[in-house]
Amino acid sequence: MANPSRQTLLEEGFRWFGPGDPVPLSHIRQTGATAIFNALHEVPYGECWTPVAIEQRKAAIEAAGLSWRVVESVPVHEDLKTATGDTARLLDNYCQTLRNLAAVGIETVVYNFMPVLDWVRTDMNWELPGGARCLRFNPIHFAAFELYALQRPGVDQDYSADQQASAAHWWKSLATDAREHFIQSIIDVFPGVKWGLSVDDIRRMLDRYQAIDANQLRSNLKRFLDTVIPVAEALGMRMAIHPDDPPFSVLGLPRIVSTADDIDAIYSMVDSPANGLCFCSGSFSARADNDLATMVKRFGPRIHAAHLRNTQRNEDGSFHEGGHLDGSADMPAIVHALLREQDRRQAKGRADWQIPFRPDHGHVMLDDLDKPVGITPGYPAIGRLRGLAEIRGLMHGLRWQTKR
Ligand code: DNO
């Protein structure tokens, strides 16, 4: 018999990267998650997703007994972030993609506005004490990338003399092939694709941001939202911006989706329920000044999807990805706040009361330690299953507690 309280839980999801994902839908089905987060990663950024391709993907997901609940992501082309080039065509394509998705009943679309790079780590394979492996960001290693691989002009102003000395020391300790591997793991980790980018490509991409500070980037985001949000709203869709990961400036670039004030500013740019947030606890928690449960309470009504994951902030300024319940973020408080948000929505009769979440990232552990990472670092099956099971247990515990 179905557990009656299950109806009031967050909707359990799992990311699937499409047919090339080493974790097949049949395995995802076994986790008990029902909501797939998926994108057509094979479509070049800026092009329109065709109805045929969308329908095929939806059919494949449904054939596995699952449902495509969240599109993650419809990427925003760099020309829109920099407000250059043929932005009218790009906006038309973006809106037409939304229409094509709405036509098959998809309502939630995640996107991000991170300049140049998507998420950034300096180690995709950091060994935890028990032998499992996780993702880590070490600012010293990132400084080494900027100083010696990228040789970014002005970089020495962004790091202290001590940090630069440590970076030099670390860089010298790396063999040539280790350096190459390290560089690629920073510049070419866009979700679900390998573009084969070079350091020169990154330099060219960075050049485009020379005159773009945080205010300018914000006004470029507003221009994007001014066009896209009314279309999404009319279609009954919800746009969910993903926070910067990590939530601070990298490569000297502005970041405008990192803090509660940033989200406040974005909500105010276009005051619509369709202009919402993908609450990524992993991204936000890498900053000590983000109080995550309070952010859920504050931004709750427009949280349209959630990524649940934890980070462990370390004293040297690095952070690594902890277990889902184990790290700097108070996961029970976050999940509790999300459940309360659902309760408020149900009390108001909102049809979209249930918030889909996915366990974001996971440790590489057990049999997964022997498998190649391929295009999906951070997304092994077993570590994510562990995260999902922990969060599922947490939700049941919290619900049981309130019923007593
Ligand atoms: C990393 C992911 C991000 C996210 C996009 C959303 O694992 O959370 O790559 O999918 O930034 O647009």
Image (cartoon, grey):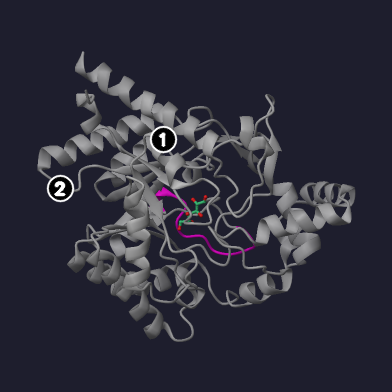
The residue identified by callout 1 is 30
The residue identified by callout 2 is 351
For this rendering, which residue is in front, 185 or 44?
44
Helix, strand or loop for the magenta stretch, by majority: loop
Q: Is residue 204 magenta?
A: no
Residue 273 pos. (x, y %): 22, 57
The C terminus is located in which quarter? Answer: top left
- Residue at image point 72% right, 60% down: 157
For this rendering, which residue is in front, 183 or 216?
183
Q: Is residue 260 magenta?
A: yes
Residue 298 pos. (x, y %): 30, 43
Residue 373 pos. (x, y %): 64, 47
Q: Amino acid at mark 2?
A: Ala
- Report the Cα–Cα distance between label 1 and label 2: 28 Å
Asked whether residue 304 is in view, the answer is yes
The N terminus is located in which quarter? Answer: top left
Relative side of 245 to 392, left or right: right
Question: Which region is colored magenta?
Answer: 250-261
Q: Amino acid at mark 1?
A: Gln
